[in-house]
Amino acid sequence: MTYNLNEIYNLFQTDGSYLSGEPFGSGHIHDTFRIVTSEKEKDDYILQKLNNNIFKNIPLLQGNIERVTVHLRNKLKKIQGSNVKRECLQLIPAGDGKSWIQDPDGNFWRMYVFISDHKSYNIVDSTDKAFEGGKAIGRFQAMLSDMPGEPLFETIPFFHNIEKRLETFNATINRDPVNRASSVREEIKHVHNRAEQMKIILRLGREGKIPLRITHNDTKFNNILLDSHDKALCVIDLDTVMPGYVHYDFGDAIRTVANTATEDEKDLSKVTMNLELFSAYAEGYLSETGNTLNEVEKDYLAFAPMLITYTIAVRFLTDYIDGDNYFKIHHEHHNIERARAQLKLVRSMEEQYGDMQKIIKNLA
Ligand code: ADP
Ligand code: GN1
Ligand code: MG
């Protein structure tokens, strides 16, 4: 599908004239373009066609992002030496003042200032970067902890709820719409064998032992931009910022930060969890949040990466069995390759669980 990006660009209150627009980044959800402007001194932009199959209510989604970015910006302004424009996403209003537009075909679009000279990684190769990632997410949670007003709108209900995810998984296997279930019996067994133990975080929540906080809920490492010196710069992809448990953010970050291979690596022997990277991320994260988390939250941090890696594996496997309707794929078997890599990562985490617990105990 091609779009007239220039025309869409002109519907927003931008500075600078449109020079070019190209697909950008490696997100799995929206269609993202970088818009370059003709004038060297003016900003470039990120223009996104939003996935409204996944996000059913774009106005409320955008309302969340407006609230979150205003709150973050006000916090950053008070921090000496901060660069608000680079450390927080900045939405560009459309002609009517709203933070999105709907084109004549019904597509929703939004625009951000492009954060220039950033680095974004799908794989992490140093403890320094892992530490920076931990600090970025810790600070993000800390800064949002006192956001006033109503709870944020739940943009995807039950997003990390493993009980619901497993219900959908089992229903999809029963429907088996594209006859793939029989080809993935091993993977299904792997999921079923671990199902009960994964429900503990939800149970602790129901028992009131861990609180709902404002969490990001999509903390894979490429949603944390670093600057040209590899220092934490900006947490992006705010679509799923909503009430959640801190374990979701900690777990999803470790899933990507400490994986020695990419999310979809086909050679499973390359997929392991690196304990040094785990430790460095945890140190950065706890340096920002250590004194706000309660004891039970801390006790279960080491468990969180298994839960989230398992949850994402279930989601990739569900999407494969369903016929690839959710995640963007780049080839026919992409989702099953992703699921296999994530299940391998769960096994690697299980083997190192004792060490992960010790590390958290020492740090906390
Ligand atoms: P998705 O939900 O599809 O992952 P994201 O909002 O994460 O969409 O955006 C996709 C990619 O676009 C990001 O991984 C990042 O590389 C890039 N990106 C998004 N926003 C910005 C921004 N303001 N400045 C620079 N790059 C950005
Ligand atoms: C998606 O939007 P993106 O590409 O950063 C997904 C996450 C998954 C991730 C797996 C809204 O993240 O939940 O963990 O893919 N986002 C949504 O790579 O479903
Ligand atoms: Mg993203």
Image: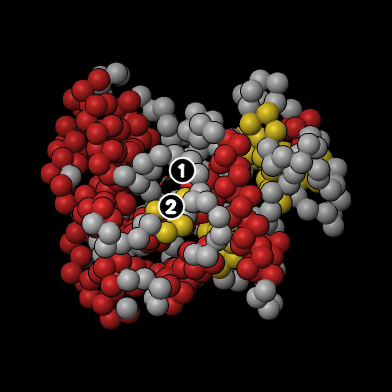
Q: Nearer the viewer, residue 6 or 235?
A: 235
Residue at the (34%, 38%) spot, across then down: 316
In the drawing, does residue 166 fall left or right of residue 136? left
Tags 1 and 2 touching, CB below 8 Å: yes
Q: Secondary structure at mark 2?
A: strand
Image quadrant holding the N terminus, namely: top right
In which quadrant of the rendered view does residue 301 lie? Answer: bottom left
Which of the two discs, 1 and 2, labels the residue nearer the N terminus? Answer: 1
Residue reaching furthest to the bottom = 362
Above or below — where is 203 with respect to 154? below
Q: Nearer the viewer, residue 10 or 144?
A: 144
**Colour scheme used in the picture?**
secondary structure
Instruction: Identify the residue under disc 2.
Output: 243
Residue at the (67%, 74%) spot, across then down: 78
In which quadrant of the rendered view does residue 178 lie? Answer: top left
In the drawing, does residue 22 fall left or right of residue 201? right
Numbered circles on residues, count: 2
Could you tell me residue 219's position as x and y percent? 45, 55
Q: Which mark is residue 194?
A: none
Could you tell me residue 220's position as x and y percent? 44, 54
Residue at the (19%, 36%) spot, across then down: 188
Instruction: Identify the residue under disc 1.
Output: 154
Q: Is residue 348 visible?
A: no
Q: Is residue 210 visible?
A: yes
Could you tell me residue 205's position as x and y percent? 28, 55
Q: Dot 2: few (<14), some (14–19), or many (≥20) neighbours within 10 Å?
A: some
Residue reaching furthest to the front = 149
Image quadrant holding the C terminus, namely: bottom left
Q: Nearer the viewer, residue 97 or 12?
A: 97
Residue at the (30%, 66%) spot, across then down: 297
